Image: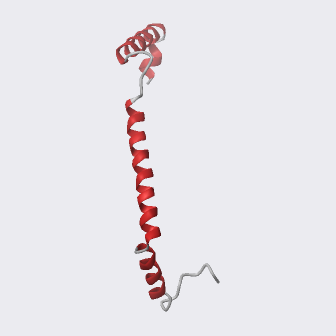
Amino acid sequence: NETEEPSKKDTPLIEKLAEFYVNSSFFKETKVELDKFSGDQRRNKLSSYKEVTYATSFCHQLKWISRRSFKNLLGNPQASIAQ
């Protein structure tokens, strides 16, 4: 069955193939390209977090949430006590 794990006899061959691949120029070129790609993604991710802006400031939002919560408390005081 092809999905079975390799036998103990095949292990040295697998290790040799893995070592051959790691030492190959194809692996080194691929790794350089992947490092460039992942570096670009990290920079884009960091810059996207910096670009987040809100239409209104935190203080403005807090003012309106507090005002709405106070009105709700006046309108139905039992609802806030039950929580």
Q: Is 76 left, or right, of 23 in this rendering?
A: right
Vertical relation: 5 (above or below) 34: below
Residue 40 placement (x, y as % from top left): 42, 46
For the point 40% across and 34% down, which residue is it? 49
The quadrant of the rendering that contains the N terminus is: bottom right
The quadrant in which residue 23 appears is: bottom left
Q: Which residue is situated farthest in the bottom direction here?
A: 9
Q: Relative to the observer, which residue lies in front, 5 or 15?
A: 15
Q: How is the image coloured?
A: secondary structure
Q: Relative to the observer, which residue lies in front, 65 or 31?
A: 31
Q: Is 44 left, or right, of 5 in this rendering?
A: left
Q: Which residue is situated farthest in the right direction here?
A: 1
Residue 72 placement (x, y as % from top left): 46, 11
For the point 43% across and 70% down, which residue is it? 25
For the point 39% across and 35% down, which residue is it? 47
Vertical relation: 64 (above or below) 43: above
Q: Relative to the observer, which residue lies in front, 42 or 61?
A: 42
The quadrant in which residue 29 appears is: bottom left
Q: Relative to the observer, which residue lies in front, 12 or 66?
A: 12
Residue 50 placement (x, y as % from top left): 37, 31
The quadrant of the rendering that contains the C terminus is: top left
